[in-house]
Amino acid sequence: MAGLSPSGGINVFWHEGMLKHDTGNGVFDTGMDPGFLDVLEKHPENSERLRNMVSILKRGPISPYISWHSGTPALISHLLSFHTPDRDGGKELCSGTFLNPGSWDAALLAAGTALSAMKHILDGHGKIAYALVRPPGHHAQPGQADGYCFLNNAGLAVQLALNSGCAKVAVVDIDVHYGNGTAEGFYHSDKVLTISLHMNHGSWGPSHPQSGSVDEIGVGKGLAIQKYEPEMMVLVVGQDSSAFDPNGRQCLTMEGYREIGQIVRKLADKYSDGRLLIVQEGGYQLTYSAYCLHATLEGVLNLPSPLLSDPIAYYPEDELMTTKVIDAIKKFQNSTAPFLKGG
């Protein structure tokens, strides 16, 4: 399906094989059947969420701006650029993260699709690409699966950019959960700046020891980032930060996602010659997640007015609380990380 020229639209990379990852039914994400419920729910990370995202991009008002491309599976050699095999040649799983028949093939497709999208940009075929993928990836650490994630799709794409000559890459993660896997993979590096905007959920066990607190700012060279002008921008999107998502506690609506898209696009235009990779992560409200994705991409396209109105719109927000949190983070940064002073 053709859209506008690559310079004026978004190149979407997708493969329907990713729908074959079956996460099952149970009580939310536990896979548990207690025996006394007549109706069990699908695991929140199920194929239907991406089917709606695909359909809104194909049949929604943004469709003329979209060009479609097929993803391909990643090779083991690709995976080893970010991931480290354990002694058994596998990856440890965790609660809520299920590996069923079809799951590993889908994970390889997700990783390879993100790599294909990044390569499309690196090869000069387009400046904006979106990897529409599942299973998600930003919780997957180099040697640890976590939080529905097996392979770190965004991390692999970032490493490809570095290996292809990009001196610096900036990652902005707006999923409601801390992008701990991506941060962990580049925690010692001064070539990758990872920024995660997430709710305060802390660690959730051995698979996720990182807390996402303000003091997790890198070590060694990873702490020595000064003036940062990336040659590639990566926007990691999760619509679970919406006001109506069952797996998050934040209050974003379509307007907020649209504005974030606009801000990141401006940063890409300013620092990376407009080069921007977008990688899909969470987002578990089946219908509203698709709407919020549409709004995000509208913002990235910097369209003069919204193409879609918000079907459920208003959600009250305590703006004073947000200001207090930002002021507290700035105070910590000024005292602990002098290079961020004035940011």
Image (cartoon, rainbow, N blue to C red):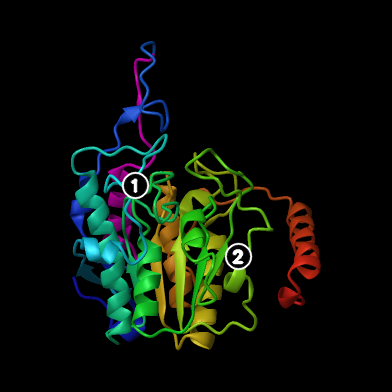
Name the secondary structure under disc 2.
Answer: loop
Q: Is residue 40 magenta?
A: yes
Q: Which residues are magenta?
A: 37-62
Residue for point 35% across, 61% down: 153
Q: Residue at x 36, y 42 (%)?
A: 92
Q: Inspect this view and state whether residue 74 appears.
A: no
The x, y position of residue 297, in whole percent, is: 42, 68
Relative height, residue 183 to residue 204 (above, below): below
Q: Nearer the viewer, mark 2 or mark 1?
A: 2
The amino acid marked with disc number 2 is Gly
Residue 38, magenta (yes or no): yes
Q: Position of residue 96 (x, y in %)?
A: 40, 35
Q: Looking at the image, do the residues carrying marks 2 and 1 touch, with CB atoms under 8 Å apart?
A: no
- Amino acid at the residue labelled 1: Arg
Helix, strand or loop at disc 1?
helix
| Residue, disc 2 | 218
The single residue placed furthest to the front in the displayed view is: 87
Is 36 above or below relative to 319? above
Residue 216 is labelled as: none
| Relative depth, front residue between 82 and 134 | 82
Q: Is residue 181 above or below residue 224?
A: above
- 231, above or below 102, in the image: below
Q: Residues within 10 Å of mark 1 (few under 14, many from 20)?
A: many
State the mark number for residue 49: 1
Q: Nearer the viewer, residue 168 or 17?
A: 168
Q: Is residue 206 visible?
A: yes
- Which quadrant is the N terminus positioned in? bottom left
Q: Position of residue 220 (x, y in %)?
A: 61, 70
